[in-house]
Image (cartoon, rainbow, N blue to C red):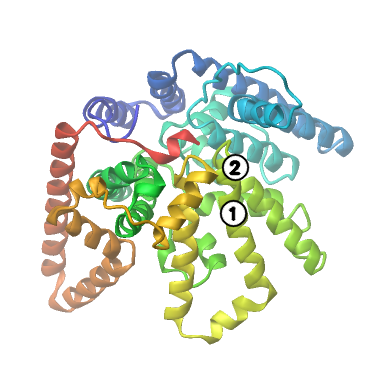
Amino acid sequence: MVFSSVVFLFIFLPWTLMIHYFLDPRYRNLFLLLVSLLFYAWGEGFLTILIISSIFVNYLGGLLIGYYKNRKLGVAKLFLGVFIAINVLVLVYFKYFNFILGNLQEAGLFSSTILSPVHLPIGISFYTFHIISYLIDVYRRDAVSQKNPFDLGLYIFLFPQLVAGPIIRYKDISQKIAARFIIGSEFTSGLIRFIRGLAKKMIIANNVAVVVDQAFAQDPGAIPTSVAWLAILCYTLQIYFDFSGYSDMAVGLGKMLGFNFPENFNYPYMANSIREFWQRWHISLSTWFRDYLYIPLGGNKGGKASTYRNLFFVFFITGLWHGASWNFIVWGLFHGCFLVIERIGFGSLLKKLPAAIGHIYTLCVVIIAWIFFRADTLTYAIGFMKALGGFNTSTNYIALSHADEYLLFILVMGIIFSTNLRVVIGNYITSKLSFVGDYALKGATMVSYFAYLALFIYCSSELAQNNYNPFIYFRF
């Protein structure tokens, strides 16, 4: 089940919110766990057993680590390693089994020519990181081990963030699991945030995705340069509005249920360096790697060579986390290379140059890197880069069949809303209205509510008319 579906919007969500609101607070966690199970089972069926098993295995792990951390730290560390290894091995089997065997086969170290497909459970990368952060937080004494397996299950399985994040630390949400209150203003704020995310997904991401899919379905040698640039620009907008839209919907749902999820995006395409880009893009993932991998490896405390090594390793894992493909690994290392270059001294130079230069440099690096993220193979990615460079003379413009005035409007809106212009204008209007009086401010607020209602109706009509509705990050 996806957020942008008729079943979710008009059946699952209204009933869940209504029952959760009127239910005795003592039973809300169990109710949310049950509806989260239903949400996941809707698409994954019997694989729901995998995550249920994971809940009880890691419940035991948390209890053992919590028991021994104040008695025998060495034993607690041993249990931490064992249970992290169990979770990583499960992830490796479901996500990387065929990738590993395929590479062994190409290297001549594996003789079988038949590889049985392993179904990738939706969201396994996200909930595995949730589990690992719980175990580490308990070991570090940042959190107390959960005594109620159902409450731990709710942390792992809570449906707004289950399949595509944001990645939430147990220590940041444990108090809300224990007790929370649904405040009217927070509920309204969450509803608006959800509608905004839905609009990002339905109006911008889905429309530019059609051009992207048509272009990348062609042989790269048959893609004209103009089409290649349009396609990668569309993909740059698609992946941002697709994923940030989902994150907005997740944060909004969390608010409506009494939770405060961390922000996952902060206008990343406004960054003036690759380092700043990763402080703004998929924030919950980048901070997870920083706190649970980069710093434990030594961070930047062991000298320059050690820092560069740690950066390369972290971004190798970042790429691999996104998918079992050399394309993703190259994408991660590509970003890692530029982070090292900025560390060596280029970052200091960027600070002295006009901000526009740093902005253009960052966008160029990010856009080129997205080619490896979107292409199915490294060969295709290289061919697509040749098309960008003007090495193709093809006149195959089939990908432009949807390039009309509406698409142009969507592109302009996408570029505008990928910046903080909306926030700046909104703050300016609010500041001006505050001098006029409370009635003007309240009137503007009511107008904005009607605008969001109209936006929701429009998204619903788009949903009813179009079956094309992929979510990019569901496959991770």
For the residues labelled 2 and 1, the Cα–Cα distance comes to 24 Å
Closest to the observer: 131 or 146? 131
Q: Amino acid at mark 1?
A: Thr
Residue found at x 13% / y 63% = 444
Viewer-proximal residue, 402 or 412? 402
The residue mark sitting in front, 2 or 1, is 2
User: On the rendered structure, is 299 left or right of 229?
Assistant: right
Q: Residues within 10 Å of mark 1 (few under 14, many from 20)?
A: some
Residue under label 2? 326
Q: Position of residue 257 (x, y in %)?
A: 37, 38
Residue 21, located in which quarter of the rendered image? Answer: top left
The label shown at residue 7 is none
Please tell me whether mark 2 sits on a helix, a strand or a loop: helix
Residue closer to the observer: 123 or 317:
317
Which residue occupies the extreme front position in the image? 393
Chain-order first, disc 2 or disc 1: 1
Crowd rating for badge 2 (residues with CA inside 10 Å; few <14, some 14–19, many 20+): some
Figure label count: 2
- Image quadrant in which the N terminus is located: top left
Task: Kindly identify the amino acid type of the residue bearing the numbered disc 2.
Answer: Trp
Residue 171 appears at what percent x and percent y?
60, 44
From this view, report whether residue 15 is shown above or below residue 212: above
Please provide percent x and percent y for residue 164. 45, 38
Tell me if residue 248 can be seen: no
Q: Is residue 202 left or right of residue 67?
A: left
Disc 1 designates what residue?
287
- 154 w.r.t. 363: above or below: above
